[in-house]
Structures are given as structure tokens and as C-alpha cells.
Image (cartoon, rainbow, N blue to C red):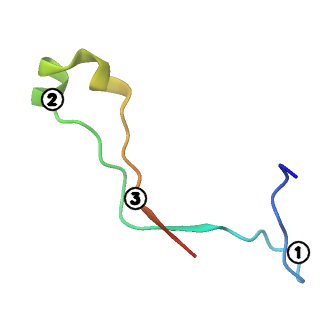
Amino acid sequence: EGEPERDFFGNFSVPFKTIGKLIVPNNEEIRINNRARSAKLRIAEKA
């Protein structure tokens, strides 16, 4: 447990498929909410 799973050929099985790119806050959001500087929204779906 805690280790990545491998398939029959030794490739890592990825549980999620990423959709699109990271969404980061714009300058206006950072000006309003300073803690948003490190925020990164990732979108994925189960594979």
C-alpha cells in the first residue's frame, strides 16, 4: 500500500486522466485575497 501500481508490462497505472491545464489566480484575485498566490486548480477524471 502506498506504492504506485504497475500493469503486466511494468508501466505505472494512472488512476486519473488530467483535463486541461492548471488554473491559477489572476492578479485581481491575488490583490483581493493574498493567500491565493499559491493556489493551483487541477481538473481530472477517473481513468
Q: Position of residue 39 (x, y in %)?
A: 36, 33
Q: Amino acid at mark 1?
A: Gly
Q: Amino acid at mark 2?
A: Glu
In the figure, residue 21 lies in which quadrant?
bottom left
Residue 7's place in the image compared with 38, above or below, is below
Report the side of 26 relative to 43 (left or right): left
Comparing 20 with 44, the one in front is: 44
Residue 13's place in the image compared with 37, above or below, is below
Identify the residue position indicated by label 1 in the image. 10
Q: Residue at x 46, y 63 (%)?
A: 44
Tally of numbered tags: 3
Q: Residue at x 29, y 26 (%)?
A: 36
Q: Position of residue 33 (x, y in %)?
A: 19, 20
Look at the numbered disc 3 and give the secondary structure of its residue: loop
Q: Position of residue 34 (x, y in %)?
A: 24, 16
Q: Quadrant of the C terminus?
A: bottom right
Q: Which mark is residue 43?
A: 3
Q: Nearer the viewer, mark 2 or mark 1?
A: 2
Look at the numbered disc 1 and give the secondary structure of its residue: loop
Crowding around mark 1 (Cα neighbors within 10 Å: few <14, some 14 to 19, many 20+) is few
- Specify which label sits upstream in the sequence, 3 or 2: 2
Report the side of 3 relative to 21 (left or right): right
Identify the residue position indicated by label 2 in the image. 29
Real-space CA distance between mark 3 and mark 1, rounded to the nearest whole angstrom: 27 Å
Label 1 near label 3: C-beta < 8 Å?
no
Q: Residue at x 88, y 74 (%)?
A: 10
Q: Amino acid at mark 3?
A: Ile
